[in-house]
Image (tube, rainbow, N blue to C red):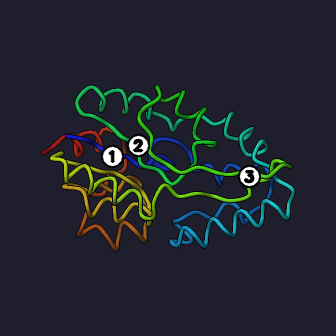
Amino acid sequence: MICCLDLEGVLVPEIWINVAKKTKVKELSLTTRDIPDYDVLMKRRLAILKERGIKLKDIQRVIAALKPLPGAKTFLRKLSGKAQVIILSDTFYEFAGPLMKQLGRPTLFCNWLSVDSKGFIKQYHLRQKDGKRKAVKALRQIGFRVHAAGDSFNDLTMLKTAHKGILFKPPAGIAKKYRKHFSVVSNYNQLLKKLLIK
């Protein structure tokens, strides 16, 4: 069995929310919980960063000060002792490095950024569109049983494609709408149990 986990909101804080707090640019706090269309969300973010003079190094400075969510490291260690784990995220390798180090460097599939000569993020690059779903589908096609956990709109196709999908601390609206389709849990002990039940 392989367990596929979202990163932000499941194991680490939402990066963009913390960038918004540090830079005092409220609009950067919007996530896929607010704008489900990832392309629309990212183009908006990149435009704001350029307008406000915020460079990649400024974002990396914020991320370097973040810690995994309380209990996340213990949860991940226990889960990794019982199953293979892959982190499927919409974040970027340029963002995730310090957080992955703190989590023990689990396998991470995510996206990457290109930066201009002045250090501004020029463009974001998706490994593939709907990558979380496609990764789960590929794992299933080569014979793995896949259990997946996420917290937001951008995780739903991954959860639907897995043999078992679990929502971890989702917003109330998502929990209410999708409770019939997925288990909904509110702490790491519950999540660990649900992921490991075949």
Task: State the image quarter where residue 128 is shown.
Answer: bottom left
- Amino acid type at circle 3 is Lys
Residue mark closest to the camera, 3 vs 2: 2
Q: Mark number for residue 4?
A: 1
Which of the 4 image quadrants contains residue 35?
A: bottom right
Q: Residue at x 52, y 66 (%)?
A: 33
Proximity of marks 1 and 2: CB atoms separated by less than 8 Å: yes
Whichever of callouts 3 and 2 sits on the residue coming sooner in the sequence is 3
Q: Earlier in the sequence, mark 1 or mark 2?
A: 1
Residue 195 on image: x %, y %: 24, 44
State the count of labels: 3
Which residue is identified by label 2? 87
Foreground residue, 104 or 194? Answer: 104
Residue 129, given in percent of the width and then of the height, sits at 45, 64
Name the one closer to the observer, 149 or 108. Answer: 108
State if disc 3 and disc 1 touch (CB < 8 Å). no
Write the residue at 72% across / 41% down.
62
- Mark 1–mark 2 distance (CA, rounded to whole Å): 6 Å
The reply, left or right, for residue 82 in relation to residue 72 is: left
* Mark pair 3, 2: CA separation: 25 Å
Hey, which quadrant is residue 43 in on the image?
bottom right
Classify mark 3: helix, strand or loop.
helix
Residue 8 x, y percent position in the rendering: 51, 49
Q: What element does badge 1 sit on?
A: strand
The vertical placement of 82 against 8, above or below, is above
